[in-house]
Amino acid sequence: SLQRDHAGGVGLAQGADWDFCTVCHQLGIPFVGVVPFPGQESRWPTKTQQQYRKLLSHCAGVVYVSKSPPQDNDEAKRMLNKRNEWLCCAADEMIAVFDGSAGGTGNCVRYWERLHGRRLRRIDPRELRC
């Protein structure tokens, strides 16, 4: 949840999560990184891994939903969904940058709506004008 003194938990997924973390860091707003498993960045390009580790260093705290890495891609997907579920259960508000497509963000939004109803702030990136 976004409050005056802290931004709450952030899933640290590439894209909007990273942008949000960067802005929070620049404004001095603490946030907690919620990571699905240790080493989630291990398959990413080296430069992306470095950016991710820099974001981790700016977190006020880090929560690892699973203490061990996945054994295969299917388990990794389940752990990513568990991270999203953890965020939904821990928060009282959510901002989702979501275009309506299938995938992890869509799963997270649907889980949120099942738990909390429609108290969701949604930003559709297709509607943004630069």
Image (cartoon, rainbow, N blue to C red):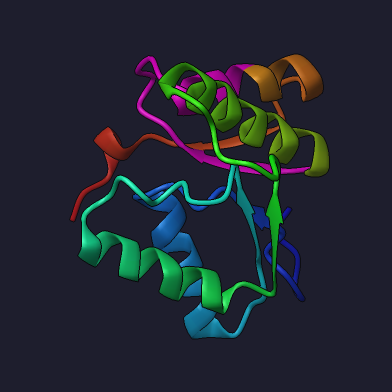
Q: Residue 74 placed where, x, y %?
A: 47, 16
Does the segment drawn in magenta span residue 82?
A: no
Quadrant of res 57: bottom right
Residue 22 visible? The answer is no
Vertical order, 37 against 53 (above or below): above
- The x, y position of residue 72, in whole percent, is 45, 23
Residue range of the region highlighted in magenta in the rendering: 92-110
Q: Residue at 59% across / 29% down in the picture?
A: 79
- Answer left or right for 29 relative to 24: right
Number of numbered labels in the structure image? 0
Question: Which residue occupies 53% across, 21% down?
Answer: 75
Pinpoint residue 56: horizontal percent, then vertical percent. Answer: 53, 69
Q: From where the camera sits, is residue 51 visible?
A: yes
Which residue sits at x=37%, y=50%?
A: 42
44 in relation to 118, above or below: below
Q: Nearer the viewer, residue 9 or 127?
A: 9
* In the foreground, 125 or 57: 57
Indicate whether residue 101 is drawn in magenta.
Answer: yes
The quarter of the displayed image where residue 63 is located: bottom right
Eyeballing the image, is 9 above or below 83? below
| Residue 112 x %, y % | 69, 25
